[in-house]
């Protein structure tokens, strides 16, 4: 049975951040799609809303599910929204889930501090673009450096998107997730804060920490992340084979 991989980007970036993963999956003959959330990438002129983000994920997942199984992959903000989606009260047609760089509860002092820092950075000349580019130049490999910002940066959507995350009931969502799940973090990721809690709430889930890697694990260590995609796909294939064998 065909498995389609649906990928959801993080805040400010766009579907272009997944170029390395899309190329890898294409080489393997695995169908994949990377979406742009409202206010990001090709949809930069739209206003970001949480409902719009969830609808975007749902449309992509249901389109993919018409052809077989679905592996949903989300990074950072996209991972948090995808967690809420997979663990929604109405179970979506997702067969496995990778949540990357998103194991923190976006509420309280932590979220307020992050929003304050982001707003301060946004007030710098050029909205802090020179500093951001300097950091990316020194942390991302040549093979992914251009991809992260190729779709533009969603500066205008950033604060409203961060504020929207505070209404997510992630603890309830995590308790409802009943598909194979992998939480993937970089060793130096600032959003590792609640990783053990996240794993404890999803039975059978796995935590994978990638050494010498920051929050941008998909772009900083693309080959490692691609190997983890392969792991998830192989696990799904093995489980499908087991179900088929037991039904004979």
Image (tube, helix red, strand yellow):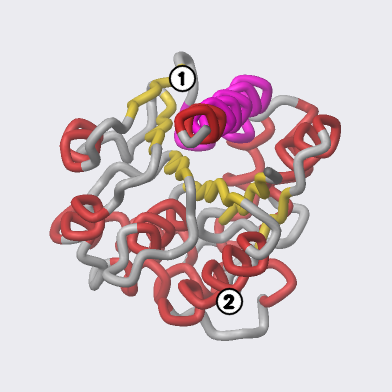
- Label pair 2/1, CB-CB below 8 angstroms: no
Q: In the image, is 47 to the left or to the right of 99?
A: right
Residue 235 magenta:
yes
Q: Quadrant of residue 112?
A: bottom left
Which secondary structure type mostly characterizes the magenta part of the structure?
helix
Q: How many marks?
A: 2
Label 2 – label 1 distance at C-alpha: 30 Å
SS type, badge 2: loop
Task: Name the residue at the front extreme.
Answer: 248
SS type, badge 1: strand
**Residue 227 in picture, x, y percent from top left:** 62, 22
Q: Is residue 59 visible?
A: yes
| Residue found at x 17% / y 55% | 171
| Residue found at x 29% / y 34% | 192
Task: Name the residue at the top extreme.
Answer: 211
The local crowd at label 2, few if under 14, some if 14 to 19, many if 20 or more residues have their Cα within 10 Å, is many
Which residue in the protein does label 2 denote? 38
Precedes in sequence: disc 2 or disc 1: 2
Magenta residues (range):
214-239
Disc marking residue 229? none
Q: Is residue 232 visible?
A: no
**Residue 149 in picture, x, y percent from top left:** 70, 52
Q: In the image, is 120 to the left or to the right of 157?
A: left
Q: In the image, is 107 to the left or to the right of 148?
A: left
Q: Is residue 167 above or below residue 189?
A: below
Residue 182 magenta:
no
**Residue 201 in picture, x, y percent from top left:** 17, 42
User: Which residue is nearer to you in this view: 128 or 53?
Assistant: 53
| Residue found at x 20% / y 65% | 169
Which residue in the protein does label 1 denote? 210
User: Which residue is nearer to you in this view: 83 or 158?
Assistant: 83
Question: The N terminus appears in which quarter of the rendering?
Answer: top right
């Amino acid at each position: 049975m065909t498995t389609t991989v649906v990928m959801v980007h993080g805040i400010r970036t766009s579907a272009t951040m997944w170029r390395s993963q899309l190329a890898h999956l294409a080489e393997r003959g695995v169908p994949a799609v990377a979406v742009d959330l409202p206010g990001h990438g090709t949809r930069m002129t739209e206003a970001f809303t949480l409902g719009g983000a969830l609808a975007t994920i749902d449309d992509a997942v249901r389109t993919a599910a018409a052809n077989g199984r679905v592996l949903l992959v989300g990074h950072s903000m996209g991972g948090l929204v995808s967690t809420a989606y997979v663990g929604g009260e109405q179970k979506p047609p997702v067969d496995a889930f990778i949540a990357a760089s998103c194991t923190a509860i976006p509420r309280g002092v932590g979220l307020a501090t992050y929003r304050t820092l982001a707003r301060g950075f946004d007030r710098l000349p050029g909205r802090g673009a020179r500093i951001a580019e300097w950091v990316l130049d020194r942390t991302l490999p040549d093979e992914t450096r251009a991809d992260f910002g190729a779709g533009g940066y969603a500066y205008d959507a950033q604060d409203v998107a961060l504020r929207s995350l505070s209404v997510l009931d992630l603890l309830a969502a995590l308790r409802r997730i009943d598909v194979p799940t992998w939480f993937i973090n970089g060793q130096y990721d600032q959003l590792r804060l609640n990783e053990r809690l996240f794993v404890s709430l999803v039975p059978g889930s796995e935590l994978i920490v990638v050494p010498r890697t920051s929050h941008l694990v998909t772009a900083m260590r693309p080959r490692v992340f691609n190997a983890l995609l392969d792991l998830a796909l192989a696990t799904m294939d093995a489980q499908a084979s087991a179900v088929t064998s037991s039904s004979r």
